[in-house]
Amino acid sequence: MVTRKLALAAALGALAPMMAHAQQALPAPIETQALRELDAWSVSALAPSQGALPTSLWSQSDPEVLALVLDRLPAVYESPATLNLARRVLFSGGEAPRGDASAAARERFEALGKMGAADELAVMAAGAGPALADVQIAQYAAQAELARGRRAEACARGRNANAGEAPPAFLLRLRAYCAAVTGDRAAADLALEFARAANAEDPWYTGAVAAAGGAPGARPPAARYDNSLSAQLSIAANLRPGPNPLANSSTLAMVALARNDASPQPQRAQAAALAFRRGVISVQEARTILAATPAEITSAVPPIVTALRRVQAAAASATPGAAGSLEAATAIAEVLRQSSAPADFNAAARFFAADIAGLQAAPDQAGAVLFARAAVATGDRQVAQRLIQSARQAGASEAALAPLDAAMAALAGARGEQGTVAMQRRIDAGGASGARAAARDVAILAALGAPVNGSVQRFILANAPQGGARADAGALVALSAAAERGAIGEGALLAVLAAGEAGPARLDAESVAQIIHALRALRLEDDARRIAAEAILAGAPAS
């Protein structure tokens, strides 16, 4: 969201006929004034109505500390809750922290690149003002444009970067690619020669650029998809994938593969499924790409592709209705069952959320619980409440449903009567064998502010909350300090670091509670609720 300079005089001029009589009473002429031009910190990809944090999010932070925190952010988020929190922080514009914040600004854009947020990164780079000439920020911007399939914009980012006399290897390779695909082999060769002179020669790029320029060698190299440049170069050169081609792929490279109609199959489907799982392409875009997977491609396709085909076949059947809905329900239930990791389950739940909401029946009792759990995972409380009730009517056990009630209470804030009822149901359903798992969920609800009466206290004292790893100790200490001084952006990112790549699902109850307390102190209540619900829904980690 790039803000442009607004001329107040122009707006007032348009109203002149209506205000002619009022202007005589004005005490002084109105001066024109322009809004401050955006920079690497103030540029934003979120509006306040979309969850942007206040513009003061960096005001209480030291730029050197921020640079370190931003550098340590993960490239892959297994937790939708921490991914959402990181996105809110990184996409929000605000005042730069006091001091030299140039290094931290570069780390901000690098974190966006590692995350794979191609669209937001490209938009923010375009509005970063003079910072876009910074060689590091320009490289991230070029990679984002490549991921979006915008070659001209990517090449322009590379040309306009202030690279000095020793351009980075990436920019030299980008120049070679830009020249080769437009038929300028001399310029491509020159760029590769510069790379050789800078000790940055890579035989793969030499062979791939030659193939893209129409002069492939006797044995062209195998396709490479480690970044968005190598992905687009491989596609342009029509290189064939080798074994496990996505093993070392960045998320931006996966976005590039997913969005390019010329990408080979099944790699395109695999990349789209992974990019969706990592939260960088929408449900609609993922479904469009995956639905276009040729029917003859049946090997190595992601499970959601197989399930999507069955759901679409049921919808198009000659006898729609209960039978078609049951076939779709069976397909969705199977893919949810296969999703053992929380991140896989959450991705499948998001992908089929609209289908689940419209189902007329579940294939069995276990399927009804899966659908209810999926609705809770997506945060659709209205649908989730209906499906939990349906699962109860289908005879599902309280042991299976009580954690869903607890997660629902967490999403609602766990206050008052709902919190009390959810805690008591969770305690009652735990039984002797599941008491420690129940104690973990109760402790998390208590951290959100659920009423803790004497019976709840006695239960927690008698049953140590089960399992889980301790959060990063250093990040927890830093998080507590950030919360005390109201450093919103820094504190939110430290909560992400404390949870780790796997998120709250792997943590012990005390760590989850500490993160929740800190987020609430920073007035990030909704994020605290999502983290609590995710931790409860995933179940207690092994001891």
Image (cartoon, rainbow, N blue to C red):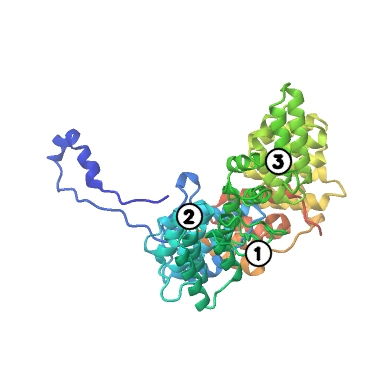
Q: Quadrant of residue 495?
A: bottom right
Q: Position of residue 125 (x, y in %)?
A: 44, 58
Question: In screen coordinates, is 493 left or right of 165?
Answer: right
Q: Quadrant of residue 324?
A: top right
Q: Secondary structure at mark 1?
A: loop
Q: Please, what is the three-letter code of the amino acid marked with disc 3?
A: Ala
The residue lying at 69 percent from left, 32 percent from top is 312
Instruction: Please name which of the two marks, 3 or 1, marks the residue nearer to the observer.
Output: 1
Above or below, 169 relative to 508: below
Gap in Å between the C-alphas at discs 2 and 1?
26 Å
User: Which of marks 1 and 3 precedes in the sequence?
Assistant: 1
Gap in Å between the C-alphas at discs 3 and 1?
48 Å
Q: Position of residue 444 (x, y in %)?
A: 69, 52
Which is more toward the observer, 428 or 358? 358
The residue lying at 64 percent from left, 56 percent from top is 77
Instruction: Please name which of the two marks, 2 or 3, marks the residue nearer to the observer.
Output: 2
* Residue 374, numbered label: 3
Q: Quadrant of the C terminus?
A: bottom right
Q: Position of residue 370 (x, y in %)?
A: 76, 39
* Residue 219, numbered label: 1
The residue lying at 52 percent from left, 54 percent from top is 118
Which is more toward the observer, 66 or 292? 292
User: Which of marks 3 and 2 precedes in the sequence?
Assistant: 2
Question: In screen coordinates, is 124 left or right of 322?
Answer: left
Q: Secondary structure at mark 2?
A: helix
Inspect this view and state whether residue 422 appears. Answer: no
Gap in Å between the C-alphas at discs 2 and 3?
38 Å
The residue that mark 2 highlights is 151
Above or below, 294 relative to 257: above
